Amino acid sequence: VPSRRVSRVSTVHNMYMSEQKAREEKEHKRGRLDARHNYLLRTVAEHLQAPQADIEDNILEGFQIELMDQFFLRPSVTLIMFCAPKVEPVETAAPATTAAPTTVTVPAPAAKPAKARVKVYITDGKNKKIETDSTILYFI
């Protein structure tokens, strides 16, 4: 049994270290953003009516920032597309109302659907399949 405990502790520690490394990598990428990146991210955020921080967080995952850098530096990447697949908002349940048998029950107001966080990815249109119901912003 002690070896199982050590194994679990080791697994949790490895997961923590992996998450810590991912956070550090994301912050390193965030430090590389300049006015050109911010202009594109701000423009995308305005058109999608989403917080720029959400767009930025999406772009900092994986190798998407590198594609932006290639767009700025290399003539071989002539366009980039910011794609935002449609996301259905998650509805929150309306609070239940309880009433005594002799009272009139007034329905609770319908809960407003929670706004779903926008997911955005970047592609040059060559290597990634684009979902047909996506909102796409082209930069040439």
Image (tube, rainbow, N blue to C red):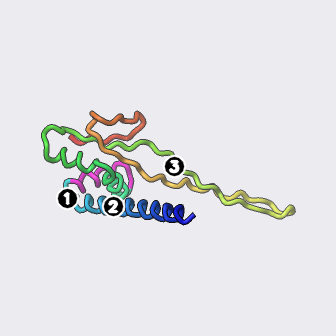
At horizontal 52% and vertical 55% (from top left) the residue drawn is: 114
Q: Percent position (x, y) of residue 5?
A: 53, 64
At horizontal 35% and vertical 56% (from top left) the residue drawn is: 57
Residue 1 in the figure: left or right of residue 81: right
Q: Secondary structure at mark 3?
A: loop
126 vs 43: above or below: above
Residue type indicated by callout 2: Lys
- Label 2–label 1 contact, CB within 8 A: no
Q: Quadrant of residue 13?
A: bottom left
Residue type indicated by callout 3: Pro
Instruction: Check if residue 17 falls in the magenta segment.
Output: no
Q: Percent position (x, y) of residue 136?
A: 34, 40
At horizontal 23% and vertical 45% (from top left) the residue drawn is: 67
Dot 1 or dot 3, earlier in sequence: 1
> Counting other residues with Cα less than 10 Å from the Cα at mark 2, is it few (<14), some (14-19), or many (20 or more)?
few
Q: Percent position (x, y) of residue 108?
A: 68, 59
Q: Which residues are magenta?
A: 37-50
Most common secondary structure along the magenta stretch = helix
Q: Secondary structure at mark 2?
A: helix
Q: Secondary structure at mark 1?
A: loop
Q: How many marks?
A: 3
Dot 2 or dot 1, earlier in sequence: 2
Disc 2 or disc 1, which is closer to the eye? 2
Q: Quadrant of residue 102?
A: bottom right
At horizontal 55% and vertical 53% (from top left) the residue drawn is: 113
110 vs 76: above or below: below
> Counting other residues with Cα less than 10 Å from the Cα at mark 3, is it few (<14), some (14-19), or many (20 or more)?
few
Dot 2 or dot 3, earlier in sequence: 2
Provide the residue designation for mark 2. Answer: 21
Instruction: Check if residue 43 falls in the magenta segment.
Output: yes
- Label 1–label 3 contact, CB within 8 A: no
